Image (spheres, grey):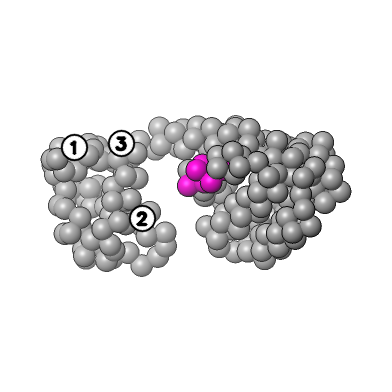
Amino acid sequence: MAQVTRTPLAEQAADLLLERIRAGEWSLGSKLPGENTLGPQLGVGRSTIREAIRRLAGQGVLSTRQGAGVFVAALDVAEEWSAALRQADINSVIEARIAIEVEAAALAAERRSPADLRAIRLAADKRDAQRTDMEAHVDVDIAFHRAIVAAAHNPILIDLFDSFTPRSRQAMIDLLRLRDEFGSDVDQHAHTAILDAIADRDGQTASALARKHLLTLKME
């Protein structure tokens, strides 16, 4: 039986479960085995199985019934619906990022300390160095933007950013997969330009550049 061999594990586990559903191993409306059975079959832990089930439930393939288990709700993913849902979520995330990060960039330019600026520069360097692994690139990108929000010295903004990070991370990964490219020189330059404006204490330029960059991420 096929086992998960690549990361991200939850996505691979979801793909393998979907393959088995497509192959007819479980019919429409049937109940899936429990996590303790599926985990060893796929070579992953229970938390990974739970995340895989959540992914397939979000795509309308599985349905979780409280106290009863997980059931097959569809025999395949409705691709057009799934893509539209991902695109809508990406745009919602970007709009929320604009609301948080554009103002944070302006405040960071006004309030940043030398230590803040060093932290943003270090995050920018790490972002520049990580252009080969997609998920790692998203992580260093988030760290760069968080350093800017932290430099704004507004505890509410940093709390909003941190609470929003898990959903933002997944949306950015989905975006890069849909675009099938990341880590370009143009993209890195856009981030460096924001850093330079903050270093120059030019809040108007910093916020304008942050807005411009985030708007380029929106899906048409």
x, y (%) of residue 151? Answer: 70, 49
- Residue 199 vs 118, above or below: the answer is above
C-alpha gap between disc 2 and disc 3: 17 Å
Depth check, front residue: 170 or 144: 144
In which quadrant will I find the N terminus?
bottom left
Q: Of the residues shown, which amino acid type is indicated by label 1?
A: Arg
192 with respect to 150 (left or right): right
Choose top left, top right, bottom left or bottom right for residue 128. Answer: bottom right
The residue located at (22%, 48%) in the rendering is 21
Mark 2, residue position: 10
Q: Name the residue under label 1.
A: 65
**x and y percentages locating residue 50 in the rendered image:** 28, 51
Secondary element at tag 1: strand
Residue 72 placement: quadrant: top left
Residue matched to label 3: 60
User: Looking at the picture, does residue 121 appear above or below residue 68?
Assistant: below
Please report the bounds of the magenta region as a residue range.
161-166
The residue at the point 61 percent across, 42 percent down is 155
Majority secondary structure of the magenta segment?
helix
Left or right position of 187 against 78: right
Relative to 204, residue 129 above or below: below
